[in-house]
Image: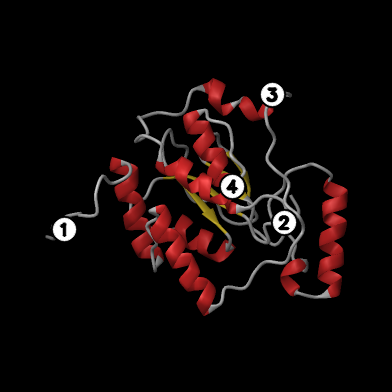
Amino acid sequence: MCFAAGFSETATEEGARLTQELVRAAGELPFFGPNCYGFINFFDGAALWPDQLVGRRRERGVVLICQSGTIALNLLFNDRSLPLGAVLTVGNQTRLAAEDLIELFAWLTSASPPSGCTWKAFRMSRALPPPPPGRAPPANRSRWSKPDAPRPRLRPCAPTPVRSPGADGAFDAFCAQAGIARCESPATLCETLKIFHAGGPLRGRKLSLWSLRR
């Protein structure tokens, strides 16, 4: 693990040069970042994380895939009874991107081969049945370690895109088409994830919530 910044996120010639050098040095090795916080895996008790670890081992939980390390830390310290199974940050997404990790976790649950497409990654995750208690079968979890297993696809080196108002509208339209619940705050995200964690994908567009206070 190398906790570092100064790559393509700086939008400078030196940052681009360092990114290209990193890609050449890595060869076909999949990696997070650069300019990210790494990952925590509470399922298997493994972490590459340069900060405090808050959480515990779990048999079942929610997977968070974040671009921002700050957002990941805030959600890691959530006090909303959200069971976190893994927290992964992608940073500049030079080699592994969010859609790669969506496909990976959907594949480990369904044992279907990765599709290599952002749209299909979301469709794959939506098609999964509500997860049963306990972890995925060991055979599914270990397929990445087999020599003949498909490897994560390699991404070309590119600067991290900056979201504009127009791009935000396009992303809204994408979420509406793909059936993705978009949350506007970390608190809303935590509560939405608890619903999906407890009951799986919703069958319709209606939902009733009751809150009891002492």
Q: Secondary structure at mark 2?
A: loop
Callout 2 touching callout 1 (CB < 8 Å): no
Residue that badge 4 annotates? 117
User: The C terminus is located in which quarter?
Assistant: bottom left
Q: Secondary structure at mark 4?
A: loop
Q: Amino acid at mark 3?
A: Lys
Q: Amino acid at mark 4?
A: Cys
Front residue (pair 158, 115): 115
Q: Nearer the viewer, mark 2 or mark 1?
A: 2
Residue that badge 1 annotates? 211
Vertical relation: 32 (above or below) 138: below
Q: Amino acid at mark 2?
A: Thr
Front residue (pair 171, 1): 171
Whole-percent x, y for residue 27 in the image: 84, 44
Q: Residues within 10 Å of mark 4 (few under 14, many from 20)?
A: few
Q: Secondary structure at mark 1?
A: loop
Marker disc for residue 94: 2
> Of callouts 3 and 1, which one flags the residue occurring earlier in the amino acid sequence?
3
Quadrant in the picture for residue 161: bottom right
Residue that badge 3 annotates? 146
Residue positioned 60% across, 25% down in the render: 142
Q: Amino acid at mark 1?
A: Ser
